Amino acid sequence: MSQTKIPVLDLKPQYESLKTEMQEAIVRVLESGQFIMGPDVKLFEQEVAAYLGVKQAIAVNSGTDALVIGLKALGIGVGDEVITTPFSFFATAESISNVGAIPIFADINAETFNLDPTAIVAKITPRTKAIMPVHLYGNPAAMAAILDIAQAHNLKVIEDCAQSFGARYYSNCAPCDLNCPESIRTSITGKHTGTIGNVGAYSFFPSKNLGAYGDGGLIVTDDEQVAETARMLRVHGAKKKYHNEVLGYNSRLDTMQAAILRVKLPHIDEWNQGRRRVAKTYNDLLAGIPGVITPHLADGHVFHQYTIRILDNKRDSVQEYLGKQGIGSMIYYPVPQDKLPVYQGQYPANPVSDLLATQVLSLPIWPEMSSANIEYIVANMQKILTE
């Protein structure tokens, strides 16, 4: 196999563009000696809350912790059911199980890769307490329909925004939302993902659109009580040090990571536009290649991943061929959550999710990616699929 010429993600251009600011921020923290809950953490929380348009932002250790603490802050616990997607990284379902609740998987929409609202309704029982949509690949889920369902059944909504920082909801993100009450669609149009439900949970893993240089996560909410509970849970269940009131976690965003994220935050919209540019170029060049379904370029989609579907059982051979040409790619996700060993045999089939797991392939994408790289990738795609 040849040496990789084009990785799935290249973070070097981003660092080079911010090198001076980044080094100044790192040195500032080193010289302060305040590495845990230092001033940059509070400042980042204030700045990110202002960017997202929410009242409260609580920085935590990871995106997974954001989900776990978010669920607990909403009062979700033992025996409760939370409806979510089978087509996501395991942290989504794992967080539900880890608070003692039961993940219930509803199938997805083949066009958006996100929860199908019609599948949600069929999964609601008297034990259902919440819906956890995932804005997969950076594409906002069908939030108008999900809110409509949640309001009708008195359910909480916690948004998994691990892949969608900076994304905004518009009704064309999910065409099925056009059938929802106009009042709901109007009230949430233009809002950032994570600010629409009761709680939003974000990840700052280095590969994310807004990535730290280590682990990091964020909980956002407009509910003061939920925010207060989340802040208590992240520091061992204590409002006041050494006066622990409930069982909590050690889940604090490092000051160093907060300082790094503060440098990056002002650039996120520009970077997301860069990703959309790359996605549009891909879509234009891939048009007409047989056996390839390209993603919908919905308004507000920030393309954490650029994911295509390859039909006719050719996905694996295409990935192998690309690798031989030095082109990185990834399969997100080869095994749906409900089919993982930890849940094996516990759930009925989700046919759309199962099918897409055999078809999806994520191609290289980063904001500064050159057209020449995209053209090289597409030329090789065309070669393998038209021979």
Image: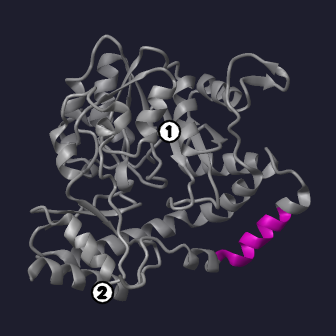
Residue displayed at 19% across by 42% down:
176
Q: Is residue 250 magenta?
A: no
Circle 2 packing at 10 Å, graded few (<14), some (14-19), many (20+), is some
Determine the secondary structure under disc 1.
strand
Q: Marks 2/1: CA distance?
A: 38 Å
Amino acid carrying label 1: it is Gly
Residue 30: image location, x then y, percent? 86, 61
Residue at 46% across / 40% down in the picture?
A: 91
- Residue at point 77% right, 65% down? 25
The residue singled out by tag 2 in the image is 376
Of badges 2 and 1, nearer the viewer stands: 2
In terms of depth relative to the viewer, which is nearer, 367 or 193? 367
- List the residue tagged with mark 1: 200
Predominant secondary structure, magenta span: helix
Q: Quadrant of the N terminus?
A: bottom left
Q: Are marks 2 and 1 in contact (CB under 8 Å)?
A: no
Magenta stretch in the rendered image: 18-28
x, y (%) of residue 271? 49, 69
Looking at the picture, how far across and down is residue 345, in whole percent?
26, 29
Q: Is residue 307 left or right of residue 221?
A: left
Q: Residue 103's image quarter?
A: top left
213 shown above or below 121: below
